[in-house]
Image: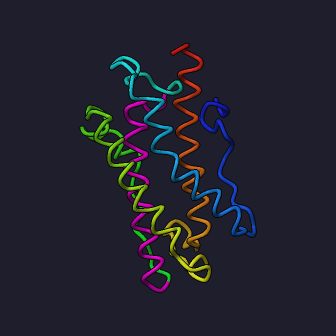
Amino acid sequence: MKDLRYPIGEFNCPDKLTAEQISEYILELETLPSRLEDLVTDFSNDQLETPYRPGGWTVRQVVHHIADSHHHSYTRFKWALTEDEPLIKAYEEKDWSILFDARTAPISLSLHYIRALHAKLVFLLKGIAADDMKKCYLHPEGNVKVSVAENIAKYAWHGNHHFAHIKNLAQREGW
């Protein structure tokens, strides 16, 4: 079960992020929308309603979750860049995943949104100064400081993590 939950391993941020690593993470964020669209666009409704693991979210819910989560991340970047260590608001992702839209909306809504959101996000991240990478927000769970650089790494991992959920399911099912 653990392998199905964490197909690329759990997030583990390097202690020191280099400019080269950050550029690689930004490239992963830049390519996620196309990779995700290529993977899921032709899925049937039955495939979209298939959980990626026993007891897990359906493919539809995962796609909508990526949009919701990365929307929050974009806002967190903006807060960190414009405020002095702001305390962010967390959200209940499991509760969001059972809302009507996450369970039933066409995935095209989130795929289009992810494409637009990532275009804005990548444009922002490519243009910020090296010193801005050190700016932080505070996460309310433990008042943990998260730097802009760490958040870049975290959301590159997050996109790849959920992409792997769907890709591995498709491979297991022979889709």
* Residue 79 lies in the magenta-colored region: yes
Q: Taking 122 as reference, is 105 above or below it?
A: above
* Residue at x 53% of width, y 37% of height: 163
Locate the N terminus and report the quarter of the image it occupies.
top right
Q: Residue at x 41, y 49 (%)?
A: 93
Residue found farthest to the bottom: 84
Q: Quadrant of residue 74?
A: bottom left
Identify the residue at horizontal 69%, vertical 43% (top origin): 9
| Left or right of 57 on screen, residue 2 | right
Q: Give the side of residue 167 with respect to residue 93, left or right.
A: right
**Which of the pair 124/165 is nearer the observer?**
124
Drawn side of residue 148 relative to residue 9, left or right: left
Q: Position of residue 115 (x, y in %)?
A: 39, 48
Can the viewer see residue 128? yes
**Residue at x-position 28% and y-position 41%:** 109
Residue 133 vs residue 146, the one in the foreground: 133
Magenta extent: 55-84
Report the residue that reaches farthest toward the right: 15
The answer to which quarter of the image holds residue 19 is bottom right
Residue nearest the viewer, comparing 126 with 100? 126
Kindly tell me whether residue 58 is visible in this rendering. Answer: no
Q: From this view, report whether residue 130 is shown above or below residue 116.
A: below
Q: How many marks?
A: 0
